[in-house]
Image: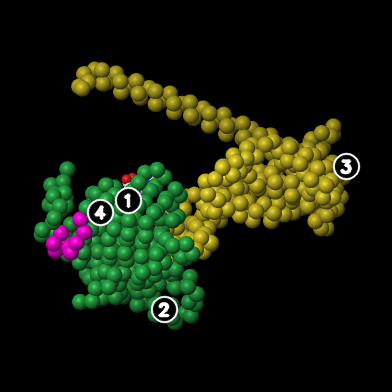
Amino acid sequence: MDETTALEVHDLNAWYGHTQALRNMSLSMMERRITAVIGPSGCGKSTFIRCLNRINDLMPGFRVAGRVLFKGQDLYAPGVDPIEIRLRIGMVFQKPNPFPKPIYDNVAYGPRLCGIKERARLDALVEESLKKAALWDEVKDKLHHSALALSGGQQQRLCIARALAVEPEVLLLDEPCSALDPIATGRIEELLLDLKKNYTMVIVTHNMQQAARVSDTTAFFMLGQLVEFGPTSQIFTNPRDKVTEDYITGRFG
Amino acid sequence: MRIEAHTLARMLSRRRRMELGFKALAVTTLAIALGSLALLLLDAIADGAGRLSWQFLTSFPSRKPEEAGILSALVGTVCLILLTAVFAFPIGVGAAIYLEEYAGKSWFSRVVEVNISNLAGVPSIIYGLLGLELFVRAMGFDRSLLSGALTMALLVLPIIIISSREALRTVPRSIREASFALGADRWQTIWHQVLPLALPGILTGSILAFSRAIGEAAPLITIGALTYVAFLPDGLFAPFTALPIQIFNWVSRPQAGFHANAAAAILVLLAVLLLMNALAVFLRQRYQKRLNL
Ligand SMILES: Nc1ncnc2c1ncn2[C@@H]1O[C@H](COP(=O)(O)OP(=O)(O)OP(=O)(O)O)[C@@H](O)[C@H]1O
Ligand SMILES: [Mg+2]
């Protein structure tokens, strides 16, 4: 197994106004692996993952210090274009957020922004992305219907397809299954395991079984700090920290 | 805590009585508002309906009330409002986009914000005075259609900015984030996602602002729009008149015939307003349907 580091976080601190949300975080995420981020509500999981593609730049009053290296390049170095970063590091949000447009236009949005106009090429990209997201068979006959008419699980897979259409290298997923039933969740988990062949992924989840099932590495956060970080099998069977053990086994207060 | 049965019953009956009281109050105020409106309308219809005719719509004003018409005023009003929209809509929406999407939370943007809200409350005659100094005199546009439209544009600008900002604010953050996460820049996000969603609100607010401008007489009188115009405006710099001015002029005449003319002109003005509001509703429905597909 070749283990190359895709994302490396060094001493990351983040603030919303005066409240600090992340403290001295350091961890690295391997290429073509799934890293799970777990921890109690409000511990900074979303904040952390949103630092990795600089989407939090848009949040008024938000500030970061520290370094996030993507293949050796510091994302927060001066002169780095956040748009280029977001093209290489895609994101799927906690709540499905399709555009109120047809399914086709949702998936084609990213490629069109990159200047792809030829119908045939867009058609191919849309089909390929929807197939990767395991949605093609369900929507191939209604590509020009509104995305809002899809079910929650279908919408979330559409959001995944939309993110894949710009062909990123990394996919960040913030609780992608929190609004879904077990069947839709199962489909998305299968999908993630399948996508692992080509993508590096970071997934935030409140579902311990999900973290155990899909991830290779797990990070446990508490109160904005990294408590424990290691191979998923070790974290779930033999955690080093008492707090981690309590949280994972549900004995957490 | 347990409430005894009879205390509870008393409490509930008191609430019911209060609710009844509020309902009666609400119905009364509504009746007063609608009633006075109906009275006004009936009065105008009684006085003016007889004068409404093709001849009235297609004649220029005249010394004889039965020969006079509102052609120049009606055409003037339509030209004025179209021209006002051409100036005020892009500037107002542009300013709203800047304030809402680009300007941060600096002291500068807060000062601008407070000023705009205050400007929306400034009496229209003040805008007339500004227009008189700025457009009629300083810029030398004279008492032209252009001066009138620019003055009206100033008058409606704050309302357009405020309602457009409101409409932009209703677009959920999640949609913007989805767009940015796909590598869109700020302008692409605004153009492809935010504006289409905000458009129904922007259009409705703007059309309501323009219909307010249609009824304004004070600023036009201040900049010196003519009250007797026996020709149609043939360009931006042509003198003009408008319906409210024509009505004002006829009402102040002693002859009863002119009063009937004024009532008829009021009915025409109301029809124009109704038409514009219908347009606002229509546009809103249409765009909303397109969004829901
Ligand atoms: N926009 C914001 N403004 C101010 N504080 C914020 C904002 N977003 C998050 N926070 C604070 O930052 C801390 C971390 O929040 P974050 O959303 O990262 O938590 P989380 O681990 O994702 O929680 P959850 O599991 O509930 O999604 C919290 O204390 C929260 O109150
Ligand atoms: Mg979160």
Give the CA distance from mark 3 to mark 4. 90 Å
- Disc 3 with disc 4 on a shared chain: no
In the rendered structure, the colour chosen for chain A is: green
Q: Chain of mark 2?
A: A
Residue A199 placement, left or right of B102: left
Q: Secondary structure at mark 3?
A: loop
On the image, the x and y values in percent for residue A250 come to: 14, 49
Q: Which residues are magenta?
A: A228-235
Which chain identifier belongs to the yellow chain?
B
Give the CA distance from mark 4 to mark 2. 43 Å
User: What residue would you read off at disc 3?
Assistant: B64
Give the CA distance from mark 1 to mark 4. 9 Å
Is disc 3 surrounded by few (<14), some (14 to 19) or many (20+) residues within 10 Å? few
- Determine if the C-beta at disc 1 is less than 8 A from ligand 1: yes
Give the CA distance from mark 1 to mark 3. 83 Å
Task: Give the residue at x 78% y 39%.
Answer: B129
Which quadrant of the view contains residue A93? bottom left
Is disc 2 surrounded by few (<14), some (14 to 19) or many (20+) residues within 10 Å? few
On the image, the x and y values in percent for residue A85 come to: 41, 66
Which quadrant of the view contains residue A26? bottom left
Q: Secondary structure at mark 2?
A: helix
> Can residue A45 be seen?
yes
User: What residue would you read off at disc 4?
Assistant: A226
Return the disc, 2 or 1, that comes first in the chain's sequence. Answer: 1
Question: Which amino acid type corresponds to the residue marked 3 in the rendered image?
Answer: Lys
Tally the marks.
Answer: 4
Question: Which amino acid type corresponds to the residue marked 4 in the rendered image?
Answer: Leu
User: What residue would you read off at disc 1?
Assistant: A22
Furthest residue to the right?
A: B63
User: What residue would you read off at disc 2?
Assistant: A123
